[in-house]
Image (cartoon, rainbow, N blue to C red):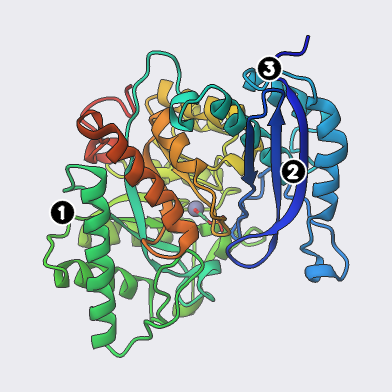
Amino acid sequence: MTSSTSISSLFAWEALDSRGNPTVACEVTLADGSTGAAMAPSGASTGTYEALELRDGGDRFDGKGTRKAVANVNDHLARAVLGLDALDQPGIDRALRAADGTAGLHRLGANAVLSVSIATAIAAAASRRMPLYRYVAESGSTPLLPMPMVNIISGGAHAGRSIDIQDLLAVPVGAQSFSDAIELAWRVRRGTVLEADNRGLNTALIADEGGLGPVLPSNRAALELLDAGIRRAGLMPGEDIAIAIDVAANQFYDPATGRYRFGVEARDLDPTTLIDEVAQWCRDFPIVSIEDVLADQDWDSWISAAQRLADIQLLGDDLFVTDSARLTRGIEDRVANAVLVKPNQTGTLSDAHSVVNQARDAGFATVLSARSGETEDSWLADLAVGWRTGQIKVGSTMRSERTAKWNRLLRIEAELGGAAEFAGRSAVASLSTSPAGTP
Ligand code: PGA
Ligand code: ZN
């Protein structure tokens, strides 16, 4: 039966992401004329077990074209969802998955599927005349502004491997509101630029997520630079600003030898030595969160890492790839206490949402995350607020694909006024005073 909220048409096209690479964009129109458009983000340091990002191959865009994925939206996915009620997001997402027929969306592409899934939710929210953050929220739940993790220094695949670890981020644990947190992060970035300039380091070039990408002699040197940047900004490390790192260890792991390669330091480390080194960083710097400290194929070492780093938020990104089965195993084996959620790692809004709920039920903290290849879309901000993820990671305080998300959160905070609830420091698993993410 068709209703005013059934999907009447949709079409996709090839757009560009923030790295200038092709991605899939889609617009969905409902019978009542409401529309929603969304673009798929794209990772550079992807996990082994992510859903498939379909690329064309061949010469066009050096193989990165998305015309096949676009055609899959216009053809297979359109046929699967035309006439369905956009208000039934789980039903839409089931139909999208069924049209593909594989668990990892290998036939039609997670980029194709996600663009339809998100665009449908945006159209449905428009039809209900609700902001997206209210539309995606569970009934009875109230909006929650997340604690941001803000990228200050990048390395790895996002900065020409100037250092091995991928992200050093500021967590404004002293902030009382979201807008306060952004201002504190801005000061850290500025302090770190001044400090880097002072040391003769290059600050003109910026990395994929808008962070600095200075060439440094060691990974530890990046932590020292950030710590000095926090102080230079007149802030107190640990009190006002804590540090989060994304080791993104997949990027320098050799599955053949089971060892990790710190290229800038010309050192090969076994998992125990890497964990020892990270534990030493945690003693010397105010680190509250560590993402992908080990590779996604090195599961047993994760168990020892979780024991050694028990008082830190241990965050699984490539480890869990927003996948319910991998998270279930992670909860059972206690390999981490927090999950990074990236909608395009799984492919649909409903699956990403259920991973957030599964994590919360297990007492895990949740961090909603953008990708290194982003777009000017801001729906991620609404998902963080509506789903009450407690934390969000979208890169630096600059570059429009990043500020699109921060600006959306600033607007939501302003819109909510005195009713704006901010997650604050206790959203971080290691600083939590109550079970992570309790609504
Ligand atoms: P990616 O990096 O989007 O390149 O995968 C982001 C991250 O690792 O958190
Ligand atoms: Zn990561």
Residue hosting label 3: 4
Tag 1: amino acid: Asp
Location of the N terminus by quadrant is top right
Above or below: residue 255 compared with residue 350: below
Residue toward you, 315 or 196: 196
Where is residue 256 shown, x and y percent of the image? 67, 60
Q: Tell me the distance, in whole angstroms, between the alpha carbons under discs 2 and 1.
A: 41 Å
Q: Secondary structure at mark 1?
A: loop
One can see residue 140 in this view: yes
Q: Is 271 situated left or right of 17 in this image?
A: left
Q: Position of residue 140 (x, y in %)?
A: 38, 13
- Secondary structure beneath dot 3 equals loop
Question: Residue 367 at what x, y percent from top left?
Answer: 42, 41
Q: Are marks 2 and 3 in contact (CB under 8 Å)?
A: no
Q: CA distance from mark 2 to mark 3?
A: 25 Å
Q: CA distance from mark 1 to mark 3?
A: 50 Å
In front of the other: label 1 or label 3? 3
Residue under pointer 2: 112
Looking at the image, is mark 2 or mark 1 nearer the viewer? 2
Q: Name the one closer to the observer, 16 or 229.
A: 16
Whether residue 428 is visible: no
Residue that lies at the very extreme toward the front in this rendered image: 33
> What secondary structure is found at the residue carrying circle 2?
helix
Q: Give the amino acid at mark 3.
A: Ser
Q: Residue at left 71%, top 43%? A: 26
Q: Quadrant of the C terminus?
A: top left
Precedes in sequence: disc 2 or disc 1: 2
The disc label shown at residue 240, or none: 1
The image quarter containing residue 185 is bottom left
Q: Earlier in the sequence, mark 1 or mark 3?
A: 3
Q: Are marks 2 and 1 in contact (CB under 8 Å)?
A: no
Residue at screen point 39% across, 64% down? 398
